Image (cartoon, grey):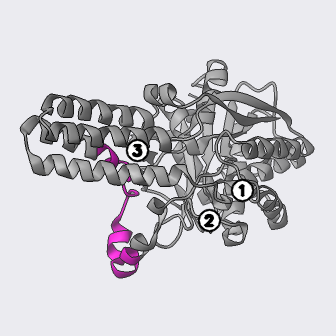
Amino acid sequence: MTASVSGTGAPAGPDEGALRAVVEQLAPIRRLPTSEGERVAARLLAERLRRLGCEVVVEEVPARGSYAWPIGLLCAAGAACALIAGRGGRAVGAIGGVLTAAAIADDISGGARLFRRAVTPRRTAWNVVARSGDPHAAWTLVILAHHDAAPSGVAFDQRVQRWVAARFPGVIEAAKASPPLWWPVIAAPLLVAAGSALDHRGLRRAGLAGALLAGAAMADIGRRPAVPGANDNLSGVAALAAVAQALRDRPVAGLRVLLVSAGAEEALQEGIRGFARLHFPRLPQDSTWFLNLDTVGSGRLVLLEGEGPLRMRDYQGGFKDLVAACAATQKISVLRGLRSHNSTDGQVPNRAGYPVATLVSVDDHKLVPHYHLDTDTPGKLDYGSVADAARLAEAVIDALATQRDPRFRA
């Protein structure tokens, strides 16, 4: 590897044809979490990474296949609590509403997922784990992507957001976080609980309406097939393959590199949780970094400051600053200061205490175009943005391998 923070050189950019080949091979495969399509995609990606010189295994990990159905059932439970409270069962409404909200929070924020485990069958996710770099190095960089794809749904329609962005550009420019889409889902059973406890019909009815709407949205998502998922997240997978090729062509010493494409990310990080159970005990926190590449084909790369559906958890500053310094050295434009109320695979190592940086992308309206829509096709990708993400990952590898700044070894 030839790049460094001090600017001694710049890695050659990945070939756009190679990036397209990855995306166009996998996009036609319907890759819902834990599906046969996810398994096929994992096998094809593993074969590609082997051809690029990596030692590769496909790890099967237990996972649940969807968040939509368990959350939808909890929304139905919240609505039932509202109806029972309206017929005199105020205690049921109050206690049931609180318990429902707590179960939703547990599921979406990476908790034990007790309700999901109770009501959905255990299935299998397929994680691709490729080893490259210096196998004897004491330091490890894990680069993450995911190869499964999300279902669509009316909830992901962007027309209202784009209408707001077109008419109120100042609002969009000032925005520092994505909309908290999960908050109304949790607010509904809490309104039921409050309305039941206070015997307030308006609050209870508002909670009932919210629970019914959220439940309908979950049912709509749960019944849909997978979208092509070119940007989310075959863009990250393509960047991962480009990094593998760079490591083959320009071997690096002093840093072990794990290229990990997880399955079942779209089931809210089920695959990476399996990776964590298997690998975190062997990855010391003081010598391991995680770089997460997720949806990097929108045009404007973003180095997230933090993420979290409920509680915002910022990433540790030192590694983010290193990634930003590498971007500046390579003259790669990276937007900073943004946070996400969604969740990516990066939140799992972040919660475990590892240094994490997550690279995503947005368009000029700070939206992810075609997000979870059937229009997320290979032809809509900005391959220059994908190439920049791969090039930045290469520069980060070199910066860590050459130990330019001892602060990042502490």
Give the foreground label among 3 and 2. Answer: 2
x and y, in percent, of residue 163 in the image: 39, 77
The Cα atoms of the two marked residues, 3 and 1, are separated by: 29 Å
Q: Residue furthest bottom?
A: 167
In whole angstroms, how far apart are the C-alphas of marks 1 and 2?
28 Å
Q: Tell me which secondary structure the magenta stretch mostly adopts.
A: helix
- Residue at figure coordinates x 80%, y 47% from the top left: 1
Mark number displayed over residue 391: 1
Q: Are marks 3 and 2 in contact (CB under 8 Å)?
A: no
| SS at badge 2 | loop
Nearer to the camera, 256 or 180: 180
Residue 177 visible, this angle: yes
Asked whether 171 falls inside the magenta stretch, the response is yes
Frontmost of labels 1 and 2 is 2
User: The residue under label 1 is which amino acid type?
Assistant: Arg
Q: Nearer the viewer, mark 3 or mark 1?
A: 3
The numbered dot on residue 309 is 3
Q: Which residues are magenta?
A: 163-187
Query: What secondary structure is marked by label 3?
Result: loop
* Mark 2: few/some/many CA within 10 Å (<14, 14-19, 20+): some
Label annotation for residue 374:
2
Q: Nearer the viewer, residue 154 or 212?
A: 212
The extreme left residue here reads 199
Image point (85%, 50%), residue name: 245
Closer to the chain start, of discs 3 and 1, is 3
Indicate the position of residue 51 as horizontal and vertical percent values. 92, 45
Residues under numbered marks 1 and 2 in contact, where contact means CB atoms less than 8 Å apart: no
Task: Between residue 92 and residue 104, name the one nearer to us.
Answer: 92
Indicate the position of residue 62 as horizontal and vertical percent values: 64, 27
